[in-house]
Every structure is written in C-alpha cells, then in structure tokens.
Amino acid sequence: MPVMNDPSPEAQLFHLVSGYWHTQAIYVAAKLRIADLLKDGPRTVDDLATATGTHRQSLYRLLRALSSIGIFSQNDNEQFSLTSLAQPLRSDVPGSQQAMAIMRGEWQYHAWGELLYSIQTGNCAFEKVYGAPLFDYLLQNPKRNELFDDAMTSIHGREASAMLESYDFSGTEKLIDVGGGNGSLLASVLQKFPDMKGILFDRPAVVDRSNEHVRDAGLNHRCQLVAGDFFTSVPSDADTYLLRHIIHDWNDDQSVTILRNCRRAMSNTDRLLVIESVIPTDNEPFFGKWFDLAMMVVPGGMERTEEEYGMLFEAAGFRMNVIRTTMEISVIEGSPV
C-alpha cells in the first residue's frame, strides 16, 4: 500500500481513487456532530461514544483516521480535540460545512454512485436513484430540504461578498432575487444598501420557509415575498433581476425559458444578473469543472462556458457582459436587446 507522502503517479492515483473514504468518514463525524461535542475542549473517546450512542472502539478508529489527515487531533490519553480543519464541522460557526458534509455524504453520495448511468444516458442519476427530480424530492422531504438550504448557505455565503465587491449595484432601487431560496443573498445586498428594496421570488413552499429568515434579518419592511414559478412568469415590479446558481440547475431549453420570462417582465432599461461559474476552456484546475459533474448527477443541469452562456442570453433577448470576481463565480450581466 502506498504511503501518504509517496510522490509516484501510482501512489497519487491510489489516494485519489480512495477519496470516498475521506468523504464518508467526514460525513459520519458530521452526522454524529463530533465537532460540536468538542467545541469546549478535548474529550475522551469514551465520553464521545456515550454522547453519540456509538460503539467505542469503532468510533475511536474513525477519529484516529480523521486525525491522521488533520481533522481532529488525538493525544496520548485517547482524547480528541478540534483542529483548524475540524472547526468548520461545527454547526455554530460562520461558514459551517456540517450540513454540506452530511448532504454530500448521505443522499447525494448515493446519486454519485450512478455517475456512469448519467454518462451513458445523459440522464440525471438523482432521478434514477430517488424516483423524482431534486427539487420535487426536497419538497417531499422537509428535513432534507432544510439541510439543503443550510448547505447552500455554507457554500454560497462567501460568494455574496465577492459579488458585492465586483459589481456596482448603485442605481438599483428594487432588486428581485429569482429563485432566492432562504433569502440569505438578498438579505446581504439589502443590508449593504439601506435604500434598496427587494423581492424574494420562489415556489410557495420555499417562500413560506424564507419568511422567518427575512424577519430575523430585520428586513420585513423592505423585502416582499412573492410565490410563483419562474417557468411560468416572473414579477415585473423591479429594475434589477438576480439569479444566483439558478441557470446551472437546468438544461438549455429550460434555462432559456427562465431567462425569457425575466425578459418579458423587464423594461429596456432594467438589468439581469446571473451569478454562476463560467468554465474556462483550458486544462487549468477549476472547481466549476467538478461542480459541473454535480449538476449532471443531482439536478440534471450543467455549468457553462462564456460562449455557452452567450448563446442562452442571445436566445432570450439579452446582450451579455461577463464580470469576473475574486472567487470562481462571475456576474453575467444581461442588457435587454
């Protein structure tokens, strides 16, 4: 078996092939909320096993393995403590990855097991495994829907700052977040621009869940919640239309439908902002290339190149301008033709 620091191609490939070992081990630690149990200091494996209702020796073996890759740290008394890499597995820290680790290691993990099916057929593996499209499945499973919201907030939370630093929202009087989910992005924008008003537009069940988040952010008086279906129509009472990580969930025909519905709602002076990863065409590492596979497997959508976005925008009646940010997302601005 290759050692961890073996630089040979065979050893490197061996560890890549074994990557799901890490994914599943981290998932179990997140599911058991080990990081939350360690936030006040080191604890023995006996304490942790009692608190989690797990088999003591098996839990020890899990934490020992995770400690070997920097997630948790073990001392000579078989006590475990948090490391900097384990801190984001806590549920009570900004940018928590606990929900993401559970979602990726649990129900999305099974869909990824059918990646070959998606490659062979072009169909969505998630639908094959669970018998329903992702967003229908989530509406039927409220606890997983809540987990999905938390996971999306954790992965997209930092993107809000990058977007606000890279794009000039001055002049926007009313912003509509189309498919805005729990409202976290819209809240970030409205908090930075106190004179701006907002509309959160999403499906009825999603809007019902968003109401508490908007209220907790103190934005009830400036943010209107509107229920609907962006495949049918989009509200027209705004001057800037924002879609973050919406278009990548859908195929080209569905995406053009969404964009055209936005165009129908807009005047010729309004703006469309699509926040997505724009895939480069070279061989350089880019997380969006892997996220593209996730879109294929889970919702059945795709990440796109600048040229591919250009074709969507043209078909929907927009001129396009791509504004890069400090992260792997871009603000794709659409101006009505």
Image: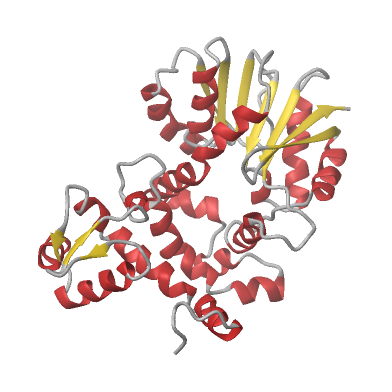
Residue located at (61% from left, 28% from top): 165
Residue located at (46% from left, 61% from top): 104
Q: Position of residue 35 (x, y in %)?
A: 26, 54
Residue located at (25% from left, 76% from top): 61
Of the 4 image quadrants, the one containing the C terminus is: top right
Residue 178 is at least partly visible in this image: yes
Vertically, is 121 above or below 310?
below
Seen as rendered, the residue at the extreme top is 195
Vertically, is 264 above or below 106?
above
Closer to the camera, 107 or 156?
Answer: 156
Vertically, is 89 above or below 233?
below
In this picture, residue 291 sits left or right of residue 279? left
In this picture, residue 99 sits left or right of residue 60? right
Of the 4 image quadrants, the one containing the N terminus is: bottom left
Residue 202 is at least partly visible in this image: no
Q: Position of residue 65 (x, y in %)?
A: 31, 73
Q: Position of residue 303 (x, y in %)?
A: 70, 53
Q: Quadrant of residue 94?
A: top left
In this picture, residue 203 sits left or right of residue 150? right
